[in-house]
Amino acid sequence: MTATIIDGKAFAAMVRAQVAEHVARLKAEHGLTPGLAVVLVGEDPASEVYVRSKGKQTVEAGMASFEHKLPADTSEQELLSLVEKLNADPEVHGILVQLPLPSHLNSDLIINAIDPAKDVDGFHISNVGLLGTGQKSMVPCTPLGCLMLLRDHLGSLSGLNAVVVGRSNIVGKPMAQLLLGDSCTVTIAHSRTKDLPEVCRRADILVAAVGRPEMVKGDWVKPGATVIDVGINRIALGDKTKLVGDVDFASAVTVAGAITPVPGGVGPMTIACLLANTLTACCRANGLPEPTGLTA
């Protein structure tokens, strides 16, 4: 048996097209242009590439892109002042402060200074609490993208056993909350879980978000399970490097019913869902119906 490959790249393109179509209607019918502000502090190469990609895709979707690049020695007060200014700007509907921040800045303090209604990363403590209690919130982009892929492939998730390997605030915990919201029976596993392979083998849905290259082996996967690999790890391959996930794809693809590849699986969904969240934030701010199929 060879698993169905879940094409996140193609699905993300479809999501971006839906967003662009909705943005065009907002402009034509209400004179509104959703705006996304991205703040980058310092010169982390990976962050710079990511921010450029976000800006490009924001503009391609018909949205306004506001980029703020600050030097690495920016003070906490300077950054807080910028966030306050963006909170008050009616043309900005989404605010994203690119992580990681330089070590002298308190990330929690900065993130929690963002207006929760503009927190398109879904990291503000208010949004975390709303998601955890099943209320309307801004949902973190990567887990939202995973949920979209699962719904598209499986339809109803109700009653399925889901195992999330990883307990980060960015992916693991919100992913578990979203799966609970879709009536899965959810287990959160991690590095201290006893007999982790056996726990994984019980999963109809297995989400790997632990940040360890190819940790989840094929014999950890229940035959026919749907495997969502969130990991993006760069490993040495001779004098070159290769991107791999948290799942050993070669062994898992022969057991799973469906699996996301790395690259080309979950990764493209993250920016697509960032655009979807910005659109949703704009609609909510103006009392307009939210786009269907683009929220949790």
Image (tube, helix red, strand yellow):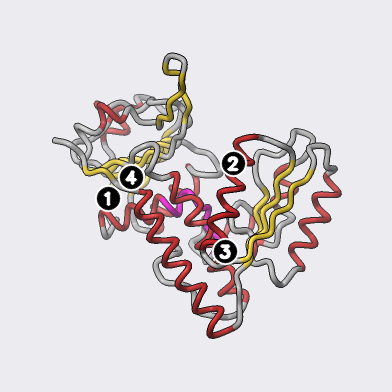
Residue 132, placed above or below residue 98:
below
Q: Residue at x 40, y 32 (%)?
A: 245
Residue 21 coordinates in the image, percent (x, y): 45, 72
**Where does label 3 land, which residue?**
278
Mark 4, residues whose alpha carbon is within 10 Å: few (<14), some, or many (≥20)? many
Q: CA distance from mark 1 to mark 4?
A: 6 Å
* Mark with earlier residue (2, 3): 2
Marks 4 and 3 in Cβ contact (< 8 Å): no
Query: Dot 2 surroundings within 10 Å: few (below 14), some, or many (20 or more)?
Result: few
Q: Is residue 257 above or below residue 200?
A: below
Nearer the camera: disc 2 or disc 4: 2
User: Which residue sits at x=27%, y=27%?
Assistant: 250
Q: Amino acid at mark 3?
A: Thr
Disc 2 versus disc 3: nearer the observer: 2
Residue type pointed to by label 1: Leu
Q: Give the alpha-carbon distance from disc 4 to disc 3, as whole Å.
A: 29 Å
Kind of residue at disc 2: Val
Residue 162 tag number:
4
| Label 2 close to label 4 by CB (< 8 Å) | no
Where in the figure is residue 255, as x and y percent of width and height?
A: 20, 33
Of labels 2 and 4, earlier in sequence is: 2
Q: Secondary structure at mark 4?
A: strand
Which portion, as a residue range, is magenta? 137-145
The extreme left residue here reads 1
Q: How far across and how far down the image is residue 124, in percent?
A: 64, 54
Looking at the image, do the residues carrying marks 1 and 4 touch, with CB atoms under 8 Å apart? yes
Q: Residue at x 77, y 39 (%)?
A: 105
